Image (tube, grey):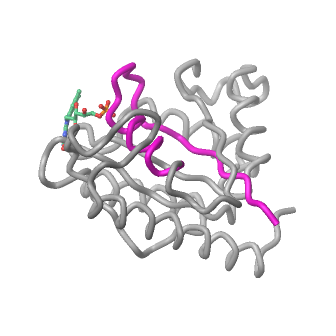
Amino acid sequence: VTYNVGYFIGSLSSESINRTLSEALIKVAPKDLHFTEIRIDDLPLYNRDLDANYPDEAVAMKEAIAASDAVLFVTPEYNRSIPGALMNAIDWASRPYGENSFDHVPVAVIGASPGGIGTAVAQQGLRGILSFCNARQMTAPEAYIQFNPEAYGEGGQVKDPELEKILTEFMREFREHIERVLTVLPRR
Ligand code: FNR
């Protein structure tokens, strides 16, 4: 059995350190996890006036989540919260009322910052949002990554063995979490 993991990167930057982190996570992940990025950069701003007539980009994003067995969030911290672009994507995904894309979906949260707190505050905020969205979160391990560019090579390579161990363990546990959740709550 393989699991399809859709992943959100909370940054729109072409030089995103969180994109670099996502490449490293995919590289060290168990081989039965298959990853697809769910892009958030083409979404208009959420407006409930459009609930009856969702824009194509938002429909495509909801379909991408529906096609995923699990969802991984790799996000920066902006002003001690999650970036507006990611919140916007979550707002679209959670609606129209009664069609919340995250309902019962196994999810995990991680992020990188140049600062020592390593997105801890943003991740706590995101956990609260995902609780409300009724996602099934991996609660442990947590991973607050202080980004050191020296630790990453080309194509997701991790040069720092300590970091590689942390990321490998995180993805191994995420795979276990997905399996556990889907055993109890198979996707409809
Ligand atoms: C930041 N940054 C930041 N870092 C942090 O650790 N806590 C914070 O609250 C903030 N706030 C913040 C606000 C805004 C508007 C910006 C642009 C940046 C710094 C941030 O961690 C850094 O720019 C990262 O490189 C952003 O991640 P990506 O885009 O490289 O993935």
Answer left or right for 132 relative to 3. left
Q: Position of residue 46 (x, y in %)?
A: 56, 27
Q: Position of residue 29 (x, y in %)?
A: 55, 58
Q: Residue at x 43, y 37 (%)?
A: 10
Above/below status of 101 relative to 153: below
Q: Quadrant of residue 20?
A: top left
Q: Position of residue 181 (x, y in %)?
A: 68, 75
In the image shown, does 63 or 170 lie closer to the viewer?
170
Q: Quadrant of the N terminus?
A: bottom right
Q: Position of residue 41 (x, y in %)?
A: 52, 22
Q: Residue furthest right?
A: 188
In the image shown, does 97 or 88 lie closer to the viewer?
88
Above/below status of 14 relative to 173: above
In the image shown, does 49 or 1 lie closer to the viewer?
1
Q: Which residues are magenta?
A: 1-26
Above/below status of 33 relative to 141: above
Q: Residue at x 34, y 23 (%)?
A: 15
Dividing the image into four quarters, tell me where ligand 1 lies. top left
In the image shown, does 16 or 97 lie closer to the viewer?
16
Q: Quadrant of the C terminus?
A: bottom right
The stretch drawn in magenta includes residue 79 = no
Q: Residue at x 33, y 60 (%)?
A: 124
Q: Residue at x 44, y 41 (%)?
A: 156
- Say how many tags the image has: 0
Q: Residue furthest left?
A: 116
Answer left or right for 148 relative to 99. left
Answer left or right for 116 relative to 40. left
Above/below status of 110 relative to 13: below
